[in-house]
Image (cartoon, coloured by chain):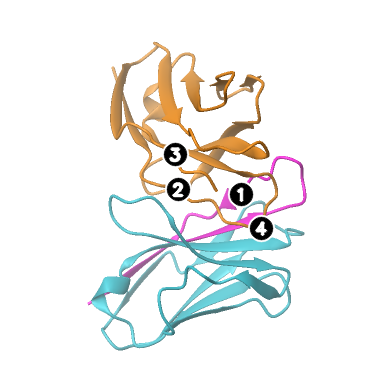
Amino acid sequence: GAGVSQTPSNKVTEKGKYVELRCDPISGHTALYWYRQSLGQGPEFLIYFQGTGAADDSGLPNDRFFAVRPEGSVSTLKIQRTERGDSAVYLCASRGEGLSGELFFGEGSRLTVL
Amino acid sequence: DAKTTQPPSMDCAEGRAANLPCNHSTISGNEYVYWYRQIHSQGPQYIIHGLKNNETNEMASLIITEDRKSSTLILPHATLRDTAVYYCIVRTINSGYALNFGKGTSLLVTP
């Protein structure tokens, strides 16, 4: 597609369950970012991929959060043993090699943990 | 990346210019000023960026002070669809480092 695609758009789960959120970046974009946004707050950085490798995962809040990008395109954010505090919108962005350094964001996946 | 300070909220009448300020007094020489906006329930959208010269595109103008310690995003003729949260961010261009958004300015454009 033309833009960054995220699935599912909405996910409701129960406390303690495992969740996967998928991001399909713009074709050819080597950089991919995951952010988390709580109500009334700006997006909070989680992890950044350059190609297949996680170049910076300093934003992941704890070891329940993990992300992969095995072929350098699609990425999956995985959350184990979900907690109510994990409820947020999870945003994915990708960036090409153009001079602007612009990030292109998807619409986000809204996660609700009951 | 340098930190930024923005007012939490602003109002603007439709058709008027919206001037959104941003302070970035600790900006370093190789850091650019970026502006993004986020319309309700959507992902952030790039607006414009600049280093030290004023910039203009089809969406907005960016005015950066000579000492680069502050900037203003100008929406010349605000419409209701410009109601959004506007984020001012400073970073090195194409840095691997992620954008740090802060809370931004919530702009309300009124009829």
Could you tell me the amino acid type at mark 3? Thr
Q: Is residue A67 above or below residue A7?
A: below
Assess whether mark 4 and mark 1 are in contact (beta carbons under 8 angstroms): no
Please state the chain letter of the residue tagged with numbered disc 4 in the rendered image: B
Where residue A43 sits, quadrant-wise, is: bottom left
* Residue under pointer 4: B96
Marked residue nearer the N-terminal end (2 or 3): 3
> Which mark lies nearer to you, 1 or 4?
4
Where residue B55 sits, quadrant-wise, is: top right
* Residue under pointer 2: B101
Could you tell me the amino acid type at mark 2? Phe
> Which mark lies nearer to you, 2 or 3?
3
Which shade is chain B?
orange
Q: Are marks 1 and 2 on the same chain?
A: no
- Magenta extent: A91-114
Is residue A93 a member of the stretch shown in magenta? yes
> Which mark lies nearer to you, 4 or 3?
3
* Residue under pointer 3: B4
* Residue under pointer 1: A103
Residue plotted at (67% across, 21% down)? B53
